[in-house]
Structures are given as structure tokens and as C-alpha cells.
Image (cartoon, rainbow, N blue to C red):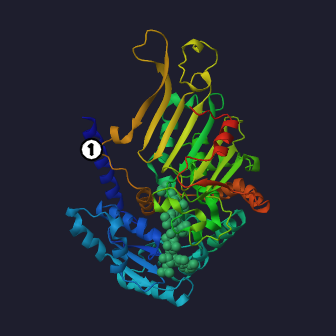
Amino acid sequence: NIQDRIKEKVDYIYQRLRTQMSSIGSSTTSDKHVFFVFGASGDLAKKKIYPTLWSLYRDGLVPENIHFIGYARSQLTTEKIFENAHKYMKVKDDEHEAYEKFLKLNSYVPGSYDKAEDFEHLHSETNKITKQPTAHRYFYLALPPSVYDSVSEMISKHCRPESPGLLRLIVEKPFGKDLESSNKLSEHLNKSYSEEEIYRIDHYLGKEMVQNIIVLRFSNKIFSRVWNRDSIAAVNIIFKEDIGTQGRGGYFDEFGIIRDVIQNHLMQILSILAMEKPRSTTGEDIRDEKVKVLRCIAPIKLEDVVIGQYTGDKESTDPEHQEGYLDDKGVPKDSTTPTFAQVVLFVNNERWDGVPFILRAGKALNEKKAEIRIQFRDVPGGMFDDNIQENNPNGKLARDELVIRVQPNEAVYLKLNTKRPGEMDFSIEETELDLTYKERYQDVKLPDAYERLILDVFTGSKINFVRSDELQEAWRIVDPVLAEIDKKKIPVIPYKFGAVGLREAFAGAAKHGYIYT
Ligand code: NDP
Ligand code: BG6
């Protein structure tokens, strides 16, 4: 039975990972490990980092001899942190014993983000706990970017393990606000850390379907022949959220949706979709190809940008929908920060010349969804002109479209034309070859993106992290248009909380040849 076979395979993978974990760091299993959560009092720590550490621990996917230390300015206790995080921890009835053990492996040390004595204190507390100055140390910076510089410097100066202990620094996005500040941050980090030690997280790289793009593209002959300008008319990469900024307006207003989602998550997807075939799946081969393709992308032109900002829908029965972006407490009343944007990119190489990559991201829309739509060109000739159904838009054969649904409800489906079943003539109907994961892989639990990525940090795999040159290229592409939007004070188009999208954006995509079927 297919489900049993899948389960067996997953069990085998987990077993292999557990073996890897128990021998990680060096050849001896007596090595100790400390995972630090900086910003332990914060939103990301509560919602993602602690729940991830718990589930990795529960599944035996952290190294043996590990301890977790939270650090922030607030005077907290471990108990308080886990009380705050409780509803995100998902502890099942039969897991309470394991959970208690996990809690005992946690400590909390309060301290500032810029005083040497606080970091010296953290260092000595760590040594007291581990009794091993060479214990490997992993530092997760779940902090606002304003304190990255001082915290990273202090860690390097005062909290490094003694040799041969490893240090890994995990940095959350945003990596800067523009090319200049991003380069400055990189330069700053490079003063204290080797590139080897820095793990820049883009959690979209930990999502199942984003990782699957590489396998779909390069392990199927059926795609390799058509993955180019000869067959593909347009590529649409879409990110939609059905929530507003929800109190994160203070952070968001400084960045806007282009910096928050498009420059990183969507451009990462684009680079994997468009890159040439890497030599292997190991080492730097994949990241090398991603950088190469990013280098072929010209900066975005203002004429290819649509920006919008959500307003409250006063008629909605949902109180959240009644609030517009400007009602968020952290947002200035005259803010023109976009909460929706669409940009069109072109990859200037032989494979992609002229094919529009339409990247669209919006908050406070009608649904939460992230998907990739690869639309193929029209079938030439008019053989079926007489058989096309009335409900077929444009009176033309619908285009084939490969859809990779990243979330929710992961799926890959191919929209194609088929003979309408049962008809006596050649009536044509659009249908789907559908690989919906929850139907095909019923018992497989897909790990959360953060679980995969933190696991990668332990195993030292950097394939799914952002390299500094990738980052530089991504900023080079968006930077000029961001400056132009600011300088020319381009107005944002208002849209109501819960809207499907912006008419102007759909029209922009259509102008570039994307056909809505
Ligand atoms: P928070 O605003 O919750 O900040 C985390 C902690 O940092 C706070 O608990 C606070 O701890 C401290 N802090 C907050 N503001 C300041 C300040 N101005 N100066 C110094 N310290 C401050 O952030 P998040 O947890 O939401 O995000 C952390 C990082 O992760 C950010 O870079 C964010 O962009 C990124 N991120 C967050 C996501 C999320 O869903 N929250 C998703 C993806 C990325 P204390 O006062 O106790 O020191
Ligand atoms: C973060 C953005 O990087 O990704 C948020 O800062 C956004 O604004 C989030 O909400 C979306 O992540 P996911 O995994 O829920 O799609």
C-alpha cells in the first residue's frame, strides 16, 4: 500500500537524521550544544522559534547534549516565556513527559543588546550550564534589525566558544532596507564572522513546495524541454494574506510589501524557477546558479509596478476587516507605504528573453495563498476553433498552466484541455492533472519551514540560506524603483480589506501577456 511505503520512507529519513544529530559537531557524542534565542520575549520567538525547538526536540532532531538559552532585556523567567508561547507549542496528551524534559533544558538570561558586561555574563552563565567552554553555540537573532549590529558584535567579542567549538549566527530578515544598508550590514557582519558562520534565514526556502521546485524541474524530462521562452508565455508568483499588519505596523511601515515579501521570498522563488541546472544538489552549486540568474535580471521599471494600500471595509461584519492600514497603531496617519504590490521582471538570457515574471504580494486580501503559475503559450493553428465551448474566455483554447501551490493545501496541478467526457464531438473542456498532497500523501506530516531550516543549521547545510551575493543582487533589482517611488511620491491605490486584488494589477499582468483562464 502506497501510504505504508511513504510512511516507511519518512521513518527512514527521520532515523537517518537522528543518527546524524547524535554525531554532530565532532566525532565524539560528548560534545555539548547551546542554542540561544535572542529576542526570547518577542513575537517570532513565541510563535515560531520555541515551538520549532520543541518539535525538533520531540522528534529527536536536535543534537544530544543540547541546552537552550533565551535572552532579551525583559525581566522574564523560562516559565513566563513558555506560558506566553503555550498556545503555539502543540503538545499532545502523550507528550507531556517529553515536554517537561524539554522545559528543563531551557534557561533565560536577561540583558541589554549593547553592554559588554551583559554579554560577558551570558558567556559565563553558558559555561556554568555546559561546563564545556568548547560547546558549540548557535545564536538565533529574533530581534528588530536596529539592534543586529551591536548584538552581533557583542556576541563575537564576548560569547564565542573556545576552539574547536563551532559558532553559527542565524539572522532574520530584513537584511537591510536597501542595497546600501544591506551592504553595510554585510560589511559589519564580515568584520566579526566568516561567511561560513552566517545563516541568513528566508523561511520560504524551508517550505516543502519551494524545495520541490528543484526536483520537479530537474528530475522530469517532460519539463526540461519546455522550461523556456519557446513554450512559456508568462510566470506569475503570487503571495496573498487575509490578515492586515496586526500590530506589526511599526515595523512594516518602514519597509512596505516590496521589501517585506517581494525582495526576499518571491525573488528567491523566482531564482529557483529560472536558474540553469545546478551541477549537483550539494555544496554551493545551487546558490551559484541562483546568483547567476539574478545577475541577468534588469532593475524593475516604474511603469511595471502597481502599488496599493488597504482601507477598512466598514460594511464587513469582521471587526478586523473594518480597520484599514492607517488605523494600525504603529502607522503614521499619512503613510503611503504599500501593503500590496505587483512588479514585473525580465530575465535577460537566452532561456527567458521576453518572458514576464509577474510577482504580486498583498496583505488584507480575500485569502491566504502562495502559488506559482507557469502559463504556456497558445497552441498554434485553429484546428479546434469550432469546438471551443462558449464558456471559454477569448473564444480560444485555454492555455496550459502548471500551478505549484506553496500554501495552504500544497499541490502541483497541470491545467490542460481534454475532450468533454461523453460528448460525441470534439468539445473541449479545461481540466486538471492534480497532485494534491493531502490526498496523495495522507499520513505524511510536512515539517514547518522553520523546523527544516533550524535542522539545517545544526547539520551545517547552507543550501537553503541566503548568500551575501544573492542578497546584493536582489537589492540591485528592486532598489532603483523603491527610490523612485519615494522620490516621485507615487500614490498608493486604495483597496478594501478582503479584496481579491487590484484591477490595475490584473490589467498590468494582462498587458504583459498573462491570460486569465
Ligand atoms: P518583536 O518586535 O517582537 O521584537 C523581539 C524582541 O526584541 C522584543 O520582545 C523586545 O525584547 C526586543 N525589541 C523590540 N523592539 C526593540 C527595539 N526598538 N530596540 C531593542 N529591542 C527591541 O519582533 P519579532 O519577534 O516580530 O521579529 C523579530 C525578527 O524576526 C525581526 O527582524 C522580524 O522582521 C523578523 N520576522 C518576524 C516574523 C514574525 O512573524 N514576527 C516573521 C518573519 C521575520 P525586549 O524588550 O525584552 O528586549
Ligand atoms: C514574513 C513577513 O517574512 O512572512 C510577514 O515579514 C508575512 O509580513 C510572513 O506575514 C508570511 O509568512 P507565511 O509563512 O505565513 O507565508
Name the residue beneath numbered marker 1. Answer: 8
26 vs 206: above or below: below
Where residue 367 appears, as percent x and y from the top left, is 48, 49
Does any atom of ligand 2 lie closer than 8 Å to the CB of label 1? Answer: no
Residue drawn at point x = 31 percent, y = 63 percent = 90
Q: Quadrant of the C terminus?
A: top right
Amino acid type at image mark 1: Glu
Label 1 Cα crowd, 10 Å radius (few <14 / some 14-19 / many 20+): few
Where residue 379 appears, as percent x and y from the top left, is 61, 21
Residue drawn at point x = 22 percent, y = 68 percent = 96
Where residue 91 appears, as percent x and y from the top left, is 27, 64
Q: Quadrant of the N terminus?
A: top left
Residue drawn at point x = 52 percent, y = 34 percent = 402
Secondary structure category for the residue under label 1: helix
Where residue 438 appears, as percent x and y from the top left, is 35, 42
The answer to which of 47 and 182 lies nearer the viewer is 47
395 vs 169: above or below: above
Q: Residue furthest top?
A: 424
117 vs 472: above or below: below
The answer to which of 502 and 254 lies nearer the viewer is 502
Q: Does 63 sit left or right of 247 as displayed?
A: left
Using the rendered view, name the quadrant where residue 399 is placed.
top right
Visible in this render: residue 27? no
Count of numbered circles in the view = 1
Using the rendered view, name the quadrant where residue 383 is placed.
top right
